[in-house]
Amino acid sequence: MITSARKFPLKGYLLLPLSTFAGYRGVDRTPFDPVILESEIHISTETNNKDEGISALYPPGWRKRAYQLFENNRVNGAYEGISLLTNIQTAREIKEIIESHIGYHEIIGCEIYGLENNHLLKIPQGSNSLGFDIAYPGGDFYSAILNGLYINPDPFLLKEYFHLLNEHGLFRSAILLGDYLSHFRKQVPSEMESEFCIYKLHLVASS
């Protein structure tokens, strides 16, 4: 896993399906991102140009169109695996293409910061604010909030922190994230060396 925070902050938009855990609305819910599905790629398609992207492997259809749009509008310089789009218009176009095939998705405005910035981040204002999550920088977007307080919830973490979450299952203030992560790592030793970063999230209207 990449451990350098030099590329933070990152800003863009995520396409996220609805959470399967009631009350949680963070990033750990499989953001839409071009992937290779062996059952769907065009077996006869060959490309030696890495710049063509994953979309070049697919035959004409909705997935190829959505992947092309994504690849042409991905945030430059992002960590590998962070599925950020540069603009709302593209996010809305992709949303319209994919939803009849893979279900409803939300457009989430996303700002990603290193943990060292937690004391600098202001509490978000406005009805569209979702709050702060703390999760892996890409990959499976493993969230310390979801996995410490919703999936196999830890009794100590529940007692000390669950009441501090907002109505979206996220922290209202980034100040709390450092302490929470420290306790989470003690309760889940397998995550002691894992890299986490801060996600500041807000909901974007579909149109």
Image: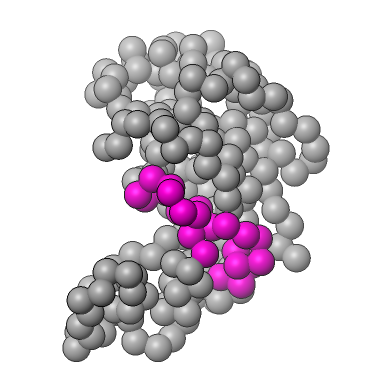
Q: Main secondary structure of the magenta part?
A: loop
Q: Is residue 56 left or right of residue 62?
A: left
Q: Which residues are magenta?
A: 73-94
Up the image or down, 85 lies above or below 114; here it is below
Place residue 193 in its image quadrant: top left
Front-lying residue, 50 or 200? 50
Residue at horizontal 57 percent and vertical 45 percent from the top: 11
Up the image or down, 70 lies above or below 26; here it is below
User: Residue 95 location in percent, x, y?
Assistant: 58, 68
Q: Is residue 118 left or right of residue 196?
A: right
> Split into 4 quadrants, where in the image is the N terminus?
top left
User: Residue 124 location in percent, x, y?
Assistant: 72, 31
| Residue 75 lies in the magenta stretch | yes
User: Residue 188 location in percent, x, y?
Assistant: 31, 20
Residue at horizontal 46 percent and vertical 54 percent from the top: 76
Up the image or down, 53 lies above or below 7; here it is below
Q: Is residue 149 left or right of residue 22?
A: left
Residue at horizontal 41 percent and vertical 79 percent from the top: 64
User: Residue 166 location in percent, x, y?
Assistant: 67, 28
Front-lying residue, 45 or 176? 45
Front-lying residue, 174 or 28? 174
The answer to whether one can see residue 159 in this image is no
Up the image or down, 92 lies above or below 155; here it is below
